[in-house]
């Protein structure tokens, strides 16, 4: 059997990334050009700025990815690209680059869902086994996804308001941290304790949906009221209390879902999967309650947005010959 080399492109938000992935498993290169420094001063990703950076970076990223992987263009089997969900302008840069590259080199074009990519980051670490549950936690999404086979996604629960990462970033703003603040809150949280006891949104409710806006408002109100009264709050305790609430809900619902659906594996994916507190708690509770379930959490550089995960997801589509023609368009609100 011949090896399948896929060139994958990811540009849905604020990272321009190109990777070469062999047989959906081996990452030969994974170039990630982050724009975060350009967005920090605005406190969030500015779509126009993001598109412009993608245009400037994409060709160099393709060249670097090819060079680092040491594969020849003739060895490539397909070009894969994220076509949604994401920022429309950002997506279009990646799609246009992918189409041009595919057309010029007579390669099939594979459209990939960004969220499927986050789940398939796990496939770069360990062979996926079904049925599995995936907890997808990023800046834009918080979802529990049940899978019975490759390419089959059933969203059994999702956030009804803010995504987990979004709550981190908004709480970070009132704490005076720079965007994105998930990582910093995680670090502060480990130095503090849960002394403020914020609410655990929907934790006991009999479904798998999430809500983080009540928690976010509780933190923001507490900080604002303290400011008005000139009271001092303990930042590390605020971070710890907020993080404990997020983790309690995520872990409780995820473990319940794994139990009810009787899964073999639990995959944790998306930017918030980098959270140390979340990783530790999930591991500990799975070991105690469901030791038969295998936990797969990709290394931190595969948790954030990157093209290697798109190459891994694309391999499944390649095998099913799910190719697109040159009419492929961006789908900003694409779901799994
Ligand atoms: O998946 P991602 O790179 O981009 C998308 O949203 O698609 O996720 C970014 C999110 C941001 O909200 C960031 O604050 C959060 O992931 N994040 C974290 C941590 N590292 C990144 N949240 C909590 N703890 C972390 N260690
Ligand atoms: Zn993402």
Image (cartoon, rainbow, N blue to C red):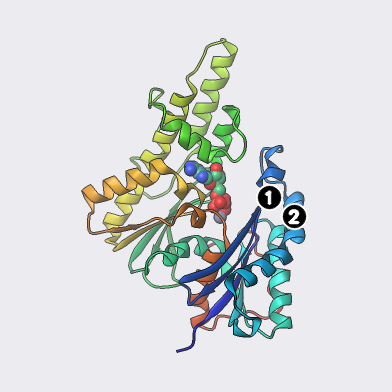
Residue in view at x 60 percent, y 81 percent? 76
Q: Is residue 161 left or right of residue 62?
A: left
Residue 259 appears in which quarter of the rendering?
bottom left
Q: Nearer the viewer, residue 63 or 38?
A: 63
Does residue 54 lie above or below 281 as drawn?
A: below
Q: Where is residue 189 in the image (x, y as percent from the top left)?
A: 44, 32
Residue in view at x 57 percent, y 76 percent? 6
Q: In this view, does 88 lie to the left or right of 119?
A: right
Q: Nearer the viewer, residue 263 or 26?
A: 26
How many marks are shown on the rendered structure? 2
**Kind of element beneath mark 1:** loop
Q: Where is residue 245 in the image (x, y as percent from the top left)?
A: 40, 35
Neighbour class for label 2 at 10 Å: few (<14), some, many (≥20)?
many
Does residue 251 lie above or below 184 as drawn?
A: below
Residue 206 - label: none
Residue 60 visible in the displayed image = yes
Residue 35 - label: 1
Q: Looking at the image, tell me whether mark 1 or mark 2 is earlier in sequence order.
A: 1
Residue in view at x 72 percent, y 82 percent? 103
User: Mark 2 highlights which residue?
Assistant: 53
Residue 162 visible in the displayed image = no
Q: Where is residue 159 in the image (x, y as percent from the top left)?
A: 48, 47
Q: In which quarter of the image is the N terminus?
A: bottom left
Q: How far apart are labels 1 and 2 at the CA level? A: 7 Å
Q: In this view, does 19 lie to the left or right of 261?
A: right
Residue 230 appears in which quarter of the rendering?
top right
Neighbour class for label 1 at 10 Å: few (<14), some, many (≥20)?
some
The verdict on label 1 being within 8 Å of ligand 1 is no
Circles 1, 2 touching at the beta carbon (< 8 Å): yes
**Kind of element beneath mark 2:** helix
The verdict on label 2 being within 8 Å of ligand 1 is no
């Amino acid at each position: 059997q011949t090896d399948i080399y896929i060139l994958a492109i990811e540009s849905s938000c604020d990272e321009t990334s190109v990777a070469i992935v062999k047989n959906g498993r081996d990452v030969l290169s994974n170039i990630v050009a982050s724009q975060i420094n350009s967005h920090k001063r605005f406190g969030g990703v500015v779509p126009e700025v993001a598109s412009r950076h993608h245009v400037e970076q994409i060709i160099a990223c393709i060249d670097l990815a090819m060079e680092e992987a040491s594969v020849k263009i003739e060895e490539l089997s397909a070009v894969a690209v994220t076509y949604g969900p994401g920022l429309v302008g950002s997506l279009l840069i990646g799609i246009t680059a992918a189409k041009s590259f595919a057309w010029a080199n007579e390669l099939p074009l594979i459209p990939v869902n960004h969220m499927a990519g986050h789940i398939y980051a796990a496939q770069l670490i360990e062979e996926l086994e079904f049925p599995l549950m995936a907890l997808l936690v990023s800046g834009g999404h918080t979802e529990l996804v049940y899978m019975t086979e490759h390419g089959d996604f059933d969203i059994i629960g999702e956030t009804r308001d803010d995504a987990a990462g979004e709550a981190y970033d908004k709480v970070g703003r009132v704490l005076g941290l720079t965007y994105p603040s998930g990582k910093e809150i995680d670090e502060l949280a480990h130095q503090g304790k849960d002394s403020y006891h914020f609410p655990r949104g929907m934790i006991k409710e009999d479904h798998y949906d999430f809500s983080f806006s009540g928690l976010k408002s509780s933190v923001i109100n507490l900080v604002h009221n303290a400011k008005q009264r000139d009271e001092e709050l303990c930042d590390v305790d605020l971070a710890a209390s907020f993080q404990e609430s997020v983790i309690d809900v995520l872990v409780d619902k995820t473990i319940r879902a794994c139990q009810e659906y009787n899964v073999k594996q639990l995959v944790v994916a998306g930017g918030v999967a980098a959270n140390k507190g979340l990783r530790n708690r999930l591991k500990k509770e799975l070991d105690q309650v469901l030791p038969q379930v295998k936990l797969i959490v990709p290394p931190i550089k595969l948790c954030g947005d990157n093209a290697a995960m798109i190459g891994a997801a694309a391999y499944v589509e390649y095998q099913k010959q799910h190719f697109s023609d040159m009419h492929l368009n961006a789908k900003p609100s694409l779901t799994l």
